[in-house]
Image (cartoon, rainbow, N blue to C red):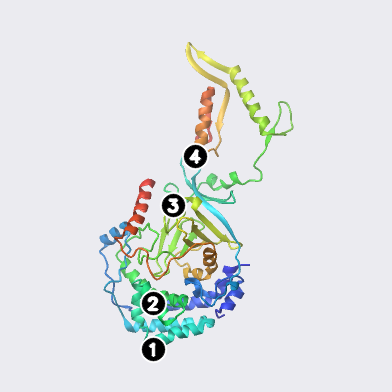
Amino acid sequence: MKISRRGFLGAAGAGTLGGVVSIFGVPKSVKAAEIPEIKTVRSTESTTICPFCGVGCGLIVSAREGKVINIEGDPDHPINEGSLCSKGMALFQIAVNERRLDKVKYRAPGSSEWEEKSWDWALPEIAKRVKKTREATFIAKEDDKIVNRTNGIACLGGAALDNEECYLYSKFARSLGVTYLEHQARI
Amino acid sequence: MNTIKGNLEILEPFVLDLKKYFEKSRALSLFKRLPLRDETDNAAQRFSEGSYLLSPCGIELNKNECNSLALELMDILKLHLIDRSDEIAAINNLFINEEIIPHKIILNTLKNEGNEIRKQISHSNLSEDLFTFFLVYLARPFREQAATFLMEEVDKLNWQYGYCPICGHWPELGHINSEGGERTLWCLCCNTKWKFKRTQCVFCLNENHEFLEIINPVNEDSYRIQACKKCKRYLKEVRNSDDVTNFPFDKIYLGTIPLDIISENQGYIQESILTVRYDNSNGNELLMYRQKVMKEKINFN
């Protein structure tokens, strides 16, 4: 098949500015009407660090219209050079997963049913119960030494929390007097 | 509708002939006097300083081979670009009437004398896009042969700049390996390939993702444009699992013209391929570019 302007446009089905050589500039003979509009989609690629463990592998996160469309290892990162472990490779499912809960579910003590609740209900309720448990189990002194701890609450940091979230979480737990403080990365 | 895939099918015979033209040229002795080559240590030093290797000063071309390559390339264009036969004939006539001498125009191209060439285009009322295409592909065997010669003493291509380590031109296409993720840049002028950071603008080294967008044509996810909102330049890219060593860069480059159109329509620009931005390795602009690379390297370590 020979390359003609019409043939190239026709077979290609969309604008090519009349033949292969037009890449170095639009030939004067090509009219604007010969250039059909080509639909496009835009996305961004940002670099970040894997939240799962202490290795700190580099990631490239692709997003389109504010939603994550792909996560992959960063080939230019000095630690992992593009590779990821099985958890890192599945990181996309943290962001995009139809099985991920996006509403508050509550099961009352003794109940077998889950109820859907609002965040306006959940947050004060959590605070109320944390306060109640802390006050009931708080130990200020032990053997005449100030300990200020509560053994009634344990905190477990999740694998998908990032550094900053973990920092805040541990600060918060320490301020309550929690000593049973653990994180997935140490498991 | 797959615009690019359609283009690639049409281009197949044309690219095959170009491939034969390049393969044939590799067996020829194109230079009477080759470009100056640095000693191994100097070449490594030049790479680390961001100086590309090819300096056309003092080179001499083999006139007979220049003529035969020009004729052969002209025949390929005549055969495949049927609806531009008048424009091809106009170029051909200039060679026949000796208004353009092959070895001189090749030397102009190798020296990146874009202004001289544009004067010729304007003076002879030639089709700029077609003549540029002709010259870049005519000069390519010479640049390729020079690249092979210059790289003989270099063990490893440790190059971290956006422009070509051999001839200094900007890359025309990037290949992203869908398995490893790394990006390889390709120089149309001398067929050199080198690795470059994926999430950075090749041209201005911008890394802020808010100013660096990826544009995909709908239904053709393998092909994309990395466009920089800061410097308004763009790079066409293809992403697949093919081995980059034998990747058909020419075919993909020519077949992805729709991406150039998309980019131009959206206000992005492409610099002239007949010149190099950093033609003086001691120039301030190149110095600033190198400093950016070095600063980033220090931050990274």
Q: Which mark is residue B136?
A: none
Label 2, on which residue? B119
Give how far across and how far down residue A35 sits, in percent.
58, 71
Q: Chain of mark 3?
A: A
State the residue at coordinates (64%, 42%).
Answer: A100
State the residue at coordinates (53%, 70%).
Answer: B255
Q: Secondary structure at mark 2?
A: helix
Label 3, on which residue? A76
Which numbered disc, 2 or 3, marks the residue closer to the eye?
Answer: 2
Instruction: Using the rendered view, name the quadrant where residue A17 is placed.
Output: bottom right
The amino acid type of the residue labelled 4 equals Cys
Say how many tags the image has.
4
Badge 4: residue crowd in 10 Å (few <14, some 14–19, many ≥20): some
**Is residue B44 positioned above or below B257 on the image?**
above
Q: Is residue A132 visible?
A: yes
Q: If you read the primary sequence from the N terminus, does the residue marked by circle 4 or circle 3 appear first?
A: 4
Q: Which mark is residue A53?
A: 4
Q: Which mark is residue B97?
A: 1
Q: Are marks 1 and 3 on the same chain?
A: no
Q: Are marks 2 and 3 on the same chain?
A: no
Badge 1: residue crowd in 10 Å (few <14, some 14–19, many ≥20): few
Badge 2: residue crowd in 10 Å (few <14, some 14–19, many ≥20): few
Q: How far separated are the C-alphas under marks 2 and 3?
A: 43 Å
Q: Is residue B121 left or right of residue A46?
A: left
Give how far across and how far down residue B91 sits, in percent.
44, 83
Q: How far separated are the C-alphas under marks 1 and 4?
A: 72 Å
Which numbered disc, 1 or 3, marks the residue closer to the eye?
Answer: 1
